[in-house]
Amino acid sequence: MESLGVLLITANIGSLCDEPEELEKSWLQEFYKTVQDHQSVFIALHLQEFGGKNYQENMGSAENFIRKLMQSEEMSQYNCIQSFIDKDFNQTEKFTALASVYFIHSSLRCVQIYDFQEKNFVSISGHTMWMGSLEDCPTVHKERFPQDFWLEFAWTRKGFMRTRWLVNDRMFDLVNLHLFHDASNLVSCDCSPSVYSANRRRALYHVLTRLKDDCNAPFFLFGDFNFRLDLKSLIQAQGWSSGDTDGHTAVYEQDGEVQLLMKCKRFEHQNSKVFQDDNEHMLLRFDHEPIPFLNELTEVQISFPPSYPFSENVSKPSEFMGTRCPAWCDRVFMSLPARALLHNGKHGEASVQYGRIGGDICMGDHKPVFLYFEMETVYQTEN
């Protein structure tokens, strides 16, 4: 039996698309560094918020960003690259702003992708970019969530995109996902779990049902889950008293000193370092949103600080932005059969790595998150 290196990366690039000149160079450098560090033969890059908030204006430059990735010298050893870009924002009932890019190393010969229309695997080669609504693309399955999942807004881009792969003798699905965000900190802390958590739970159950309705293949589900800490429980655990509170501002105090000030889109913590400095074990006690799914999904143990929301100021790459409570929004989950594909390899536990990219580099408000593992196969790659 042989093992091959697989690298899964998820990144919300909304900030990058809105400020490409300022952030693109450092983003690409960190991406290439991660690729170089892990020497994987199969890389999956899942992107959310493709085009950013001003997607009507930015879609062209966002598309050029993908072309730059595909044509870069750093990725030249990946002679087969497949990209799927949902860029047709005029189809408002279908648009998800998701993009998925897959890099296959020249040494890996036995790779096929699934044709969902013909219901069989097909061979691939060269550089291929599928763009538009993707409705006519046979090798990707894409859905936007039904509108009644998010009644508070007239329109949303959230949804998921799936591809299926046969890599040597192993079949698995790769699912790019973007779940609903928290619109207001004040609403988030009103109850436990929050109403936003309930929306995300419903949407994720919908995705899992859709996956099971098909062939129930092993799958890796990675993207921007928008999972947030249980804010009400977090505040209660601190023992703070509620100070002057009105409909627009909430203040929490301890010994007469303000510890936290919250508004709809402000989160000003007196000691923001509590969310850094290897403090994830304390904070993970309030990471409740994955719990209802742990009979179907699993995740490698988190040992890195939250991935969101970071300052978009290039001079403050490690500082959180004072807008939301920091949380692990960007995640890599997998089904239980998929977890069995993670092979410890010749280096033991060190062969499986789960981490955050660009801790000391500004990459936008989200830090990309990666999972690297070795997958055991029958067929050998070329030396």
Image (cartoon, rainbow, N blue to C red):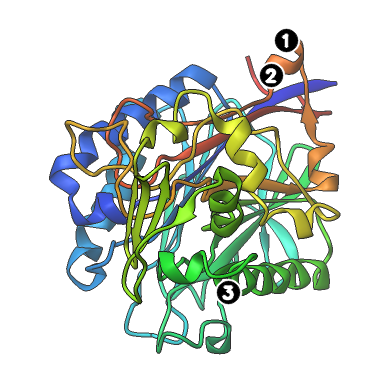
**Three-letter residue code for mark 3:** Val
- Disc 3 and disc 2 in contact, CB within 8 angstroms: no
The numbered mark at residue 79 is none
Q: Residue 142: which quarter of the image?
A: bottom right
Q: Residues within 10 Å of mark 1 (few under 14, many from 20)?
A: few
User: Foreground mark, 3 or 1?
Assistant: 3
Say the numbered circle drawn on residue 351: 2
Q: Decide which of 264, 253 is in the foreground and name it.
A: 253
CB atoms at circles 3 and 1 under 8 Å apart? no
Please report the residue visible at 26 percent of the width from the left and 42 percent of the height from the top. Answer: 311
Q: Which residue is mark 1?
A: 347
Q: Position of residue 227 (x, y in %)?
A: 56, 56
Query: Residue at image x 67%, y 48%?
Result: 112
Q: Position of residue 101 (x, y in %)?
A: 47, 49
Q: Position of residue 157 (x, y in %)?
A: 43, 74
* Label 2 SS: helix
Kindly check if marks 1 and 2 are in contact, taking CB atoms under 8 A apart as contact. Answer: yes
- Tag 3 secondary structure: helix
Mark 3 / mark 2, whichever is N-terminal: 3
Alpha-carbon span between mark 1 and mark 2: 6 Å
Mark 1 or mark 3, which is nearer the start of the sequence? 3
How many numbered badges does the structure rendering display?
Answer: 3
The residue singled out by tag 3 in the image is 195
Q: At label 2, which amino acid type do we have?
A: Ser
Tell me which residue sits at (22%, 73%) in the image: 56
